[in-house]
Image: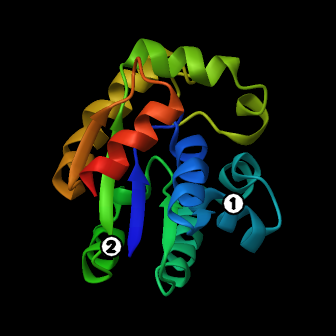
Amino acid sequence: MIVVLAGYRGSGKTTVGRMLADRLWYRFADVDDAIVQRAGKTIADIFAQDGEEHFRDIETAALRELLRETDLVLGLGGGTLGRQENRDMLRDARARVVYLRCDPQELLRRIQSDPRSAATRPSLTPLGGGLEEINLKLAEREPIYRQCAHVEIDVTRLKPEEVVNRILRLL
């Protein structure tokens, strides 16, 4: 089985994913980490030097490779589900998709409290990464997250351990 965690940056996909994989005795993989490894540079550098389209091409190739595995918990990038090809691959792999939903204010707090964010995560719009950008991107992405998800969990006020326990009950 492949369990896929989807959601906006800061929703806890990596933190929860590692813990969930440990509980299931699965391997954890993060699409963003696979992209960085393939490209040999940070996501921010890929966006700045090569553009978002090139980043999305690498992302699709990384996802295709990761979906060949079994017994995997996979953390998606926040925009991975934006491509129909990626959604089709997840469906064809019969992956169980969990949408980690989080309120925009809490997402902003989490992103700002992560010291790696500014260096590794590019702004997604000219708005510069603040609350207005989060609201804009969520308005675009949330319908897609919901379309793909088998399970939706509001993680706004939950600790990672609580999220893992809910996912385990729902799988």
Q: Is residue 11 above or below residue 22?
A: above
Task: Tell me where residue 103 appears, x and y as whole percent.
Answer: 36, 19
Q: Is residue 127 left or right of residue 92?
A: right
Front-most of 113 and 61?
113
Q: Is residue 145 left or right of residue 160?
A: left
Q: Is residue 14 above or below residue 68?
A: above
Task: Tell me where residue 68 appears, x and y as whole percent.
Answer: 49, 87
Which residue is denoted by mark 1 in the rendering?
Answer: 33
Q: Gap in Å between the C-alphas at discs 1 and 2?
A: 18 Å
Which quadrant of the view contains residue 37? bottom right
Within 10 Å of the Cα at label 2, are there few (<14), some (14-19), or many (20+) other Cα atoms? many
Please name the residue shown 56% across and 14% down the image.
109
Please name the residue shown 50% across and 63% down the image.
24
Task: Tell me where residue 141 appears, x and y as whole percent.
Answer: 30, 42
Q: Is label 2 in a helix, a strand or a loop? A: helix
Amino acid at pointer 2:
Leu
Please name the residue shown 58% across and 21% down the image.
110
Within 10 Å of the Cα at label 1, are there few (<14), some (14-19), or many (20+) other Cα atoms? some
Please name the residue shown 69% across and 52% down the image.
43
Amino acid at pointer 1:
Asp
Q: Is label 1 in a helix, a strand or a loop? A: helix
Quadrant where the C terminus sits is: bottom left
Q: Is residue 21 left or right of residue 146?
A: right
Res 90 label: 2
Front-most of 67 and 52?
67
User: Is there a contact, CB below 8 Å, between mark 1 and mark 2?
Assistant: no
Q: Disc 1 or 2, which lies upstream in sequence?
A: 1
Quadrant where the N terminus sits is: bottom left
- The answer, for residue 138, to whether it is visible in the render is yes
Task: Tell me where residue 129 appears, x and y as whole percent.
Answer: 56, 24
Which quadrant of the view contains residue 22? bottom right
Front-most of 59 and 157?
157
